[in-house]
Image: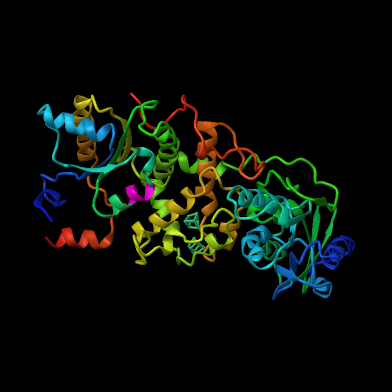
Amino acid sequence: MAERNTEQIEKIRDVVAQDLLSGRIDLLLGWEKGHYWWQSRPLFARSKKDLDKLVWDPFCAVNLSRYLPDELKIHSKVGVLVKGCDARAFNRLLQDHMVQRDRVVLYGLPCPGMLDYSRLAEEAGGNLVGLVEQNGRVILKTDSGEKEAERKDLLIEKCRDCLYPNPVVYDQMLFSPQGEKSAPERFKVVEELENLSAEERFAYWEKELSRCLRCYACRQACPYCSCRECFVEQENPRWQGRAYQTSENFMFHLVRAYHGAGRCIDCGECERACPVGIPLQELNRKLIKDINELYGDYEAGLDAELEPPLLTYRPDDPAAFSEK
Amino acid sequence: MSAALNETSADWEPLVVAFCCNWCSYAGGDLAGTSRMSYPANVKVIRVPCCGRMNPMFVLRAFQRGADGVLVAGCHPGDCHYSTGNYHGRRRLSAFKRLFEFAGFEPERFEVRWISSSEGDKFAEEMETMTAKIKALGPNRKMRDARWQSVTQSK
Ligand code: SF4
Ligand code: SF4
């Protein structure tokens, strides 16, 4: 069992219970425990009683904003708990006109970063049965005893290089913000790949992508993939073939990543959702890095008023090809 | 499939697909023709309304179906028939070109050029250069649809 952060959970419950009762919101999107103690899954709370299941623990990685477009079809007002990445996802959806600001109440949760079960298990060595957090350290409990580790070494991939753990948009901030963060290694893998030859890069991606099941979990988890009809399911023309072959893998992955050009908020949910561990985030980050280099710094999701770089231009823009 | 496309033969000829904008580059190709300039028959031209209309899926699909190189040609910046189409195209195609290369494709396989309707000579020249580059590079085997490959190999 993970130690429950009872005080914080009580506070969240108090605030949202009032709003559910008063009718300010009809539904709250939060988290509840999943099948295992190290899983927290989305909670759809419609009554005060549902809130008994609410948790806020180091496994609440699921980006809840992704559920808003669907829930707003059946509820008139929805409340949602937002970490840093959920808040940026909300801005993304707002820019795509998939949500309406006045129909959503955002409760801000500054995020300490979520923990990765596979890293915990590996670090613990034995059969992991629970954990306790203490001042930036995690005490892992196994059948045979306890082991301590640095919290930052146990974070899930997407939290390691997260720059904005504090919600950038909210109606009510529930706790005091986390300190400033830096992410010096955000583009490290991209740069390593850039330094390889074309042949080596192709071999790398061909191998990585060959595991793709085309289950589209990456798309389902993604806040920029809000299209009603995705190109992979279009029948006429049928862009995405079903065959298991290299060219179809590249078709899907290049187009999926490209659809996020200037839009991806770098929340890493695609990679976290992928059942076969494809490093999808590196494709997304390549685009973020290049667009920033070519057309100026831009962080998707930070400010819904700023125009995404591929929706605008300057007459004197540089190009990645010869313009002579 | 024509013998020109048979990859195993020594006199292999590349297939280059050129997406040309209706208002400038396609007219540039017309001018090259009416001025009796010649350019390689390896180039197959597909007319698009504007280079801002280019969906990268067109490019990937061309490669899947047998292209060895793809060129997108549009009006010079500032000359777009729709005023800003090529400005948008420049950003989008730049981002795509970099991503395409990041995935391990050779930079020469996908190019973008500005060719106006009065530049028949430039049109012929660019088609010449592109074809020569792809010929030196060899056939595209990375992004080719397996069914297409079996068709050519059985011939
Ligand atoms: S992959 Fe592209 S078409 Fe499909 S949902 Fe995402 S953005 Fe839309
Ligand atoms: S989640 Fe992974 S396996 Fe599924 S479609 Fe996406 S990349 Fe492929």
Magenta stretch prevailing secondary structure: helix
Q: Position of residue A76 (x, y in %)?
A: 71, 63
User: Is A74 one of the magenta-colored residues?
Assistant: no
**Horizontal relation, residue A45 to residue A64: left or right:** right
Picture quarter with the N terminus of chain A: bottom right
In the image: residue B36, left or right of residue A167: left
Snapshot quadrant of residue B14:
top left
Residue A66 x, y percent position in the rendering: 63, 59
What colour scheme governs how the chains and residues are painted in the rendered image of this protein?
A: rainbow
Q: Which range is magenta? A: B56-60
**Is residue A241 rendered to the left or right of residue A128?**
left
Residue A324's place in the image compared with A16, above or below, is: above
* Residue A239 seen in render: yes
Residue A191: percent from left, percent from top: 51, 40
Q: Which corner quadrant of the image does residue B41 belong to?
A: top left
Q: Residue at x 45, y 63 (%)?
A: A212
**Quadrant where the image shows the C terminus of chain A:** top left
Between residues B67 and A187, which one lies in front from this camera angle?
A: B67
Instruction: State the residue in front, A157 or A65.
Output: A65
